[in-house]
Image (tube, rainbow, N blue to C red):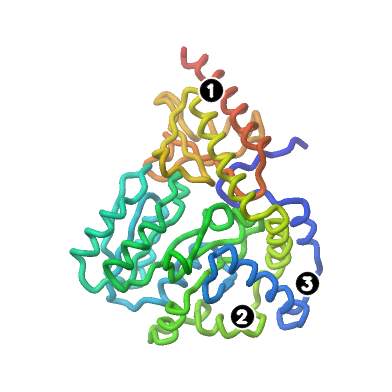
Amino acid sequence: MPRVNLRISGPTPLPPEVRAALSTDMVSHRSEAFRAIVREVLPGLGAVFGDPATVLPFTCSGTGGLEAAVVNTLRPGQRVVVVSIGYFGGRLADIARTAGLDVVLVEVPWGRAADPQDLAAALRRTPDVAAVLMTHNETSTGVLNPLPELCAVVREHSDALVVADVVSSVGATPVLMREWGVDVAVGVSQKALMSPPGLALLGVSARALAVAAANPVRRGYFDFTAMAAAVEEGTTTYTPAIPVFYALRVALRMIEDEGWDRVLARHRRLAERCRDGIVDLGLEPAAERAYASPTVTSLSLPGELRASEVRERLAEEHHVLVASGRAKWKESVLRVGHLGHVGDEDVEGVLAALGAVLRDGGARHGG
């Protein structure tokens, strides 16, 4: 069977060592054996998240983790500013509205990063902001937001909490929660951390823990206070995705063995190679180059080509799996993931396959 080059933004390919870990037999999630795994994995994640007060592992998707962040730290009727630079920024706004929050939306044209001065202006004209919610890396557009600068603006103009979606950035580019002043950073297991889906991983500051403990809004499964107490004891509130913990333990050891600086440099290098290769094919990146993501590249297709058709041909003829754009970019943009367990041959394989499809497609369209 031909090797599939899985180049979506997640789930991402699993290293052989991680796949082997998934064959480990089950243990009780209340056993000392499992507690030993938790006490290795969560401190390791703390280093990747930039030294939060704790990391809370909820067995759910990243969207569940974002909802957990909102319902623990905020109350219905409170005002929040949501900075949206794409589809997943819009999802953050939807989650906030569902929780009964008063949402002030700072909407940025797709393909661009947020301007810290626009956020500053929004905070100056908006009183009583309880939190600012934003994506760090927007996978729908391939843009990396300047999160350190955005956090600095929040700290300068308000006492608002900062909630960041780091789903597709953590593990591939710096996330420095304590240094930047992020209160809740929501990541997942299945992207740059080279593990299967199943865990939302929330870095949480001491301030956010205190706010959650004082929040009268009732939570059940997603309660920060209960999960923080369980983590302190080396376990989780309810039955977790135990195999994902097995996988994360191995993946974090692999990151440590490679070296954090080398992991970051590898992601930067492969992202640059992907974008350079796209330009060489006569295509244009859809994201502004200065803020292009180290984990996802978005590219605009010529008007005569539909993204769904190109994606299908890449899969059927070359065993390369990429993603179409989201929403208004659905048929005009392709997205290539280069995060986690990825090397030069994976990116070169995408570029070669895309070149072949474009040459054939161009001939059929008279180009």
Residue 26 has which mark? 3
Q: Position of residue 22 (x, y in %)?
A: 76, 61
- Pick whichever, 280 or 65, lies toward us: 280
Local crowd size for mark 2, using a 10 Å CA cut-off: few (<14), some (14–19), many (≥20): many
| Sequence order check, earlier mark of 3 and 1 | 3
Taking the image as shown, residue 111 lies to the left or right of residue 229, namely left
Residue labelled with disc 1? 358
Vertical side of 227 occupied by 281: above or below: above
| Sequence order check, earlier mark of 2 and 1 | 2
Local crowd size for mark 3, using a 10 Å CA cut-off: few (<14), some (14–19), many (≥20): few
Residue 37 has which mark? none
Local crowd size for mark 1, using a 10 Å CA cut-off: few (<14), some (14–19), many (≥20): many
Residue appearing at x 68%, y 56% in the figure: 255
Task: Please give the count of numbered marks on the rendered protein.
Answer: 3
Q: CA distance from mark 3 to mark 1?
A: 47 Å
Disc 3 secondary structure class: loop
> Of discs 3 and 2, which sits in the foreground?
2
Q: CA distance from mark 3 to mark 2?
A: 19 Å
Q: Position of residue 153 (x, y in %)?
A: 31, 62
Q: Position of residue 330 (x, y in %)?
A: 43, 40
Taking the image as shown, residue 87 lies to the left or right of residue 126, namely right
Disc 1 secondary structure class: helix
The reply to whether the C-beta atoms of the residues labelled 3 and 2 are less than 8 Å apart is: no
> Of discs 2 and 1, which sits in the foreground?
2
Type of the residue with mark 2:
Val
Residue 231 has which mark? 2
Q: Position of residue 100 (x, y in %)?
A: 32, 72
Q: CA distance from mark 2 to mark 1?
A: 51 Å
Type of the residue with mark 1:
Leu
Residue appearing at x 43%, y 71% in the figure: 183
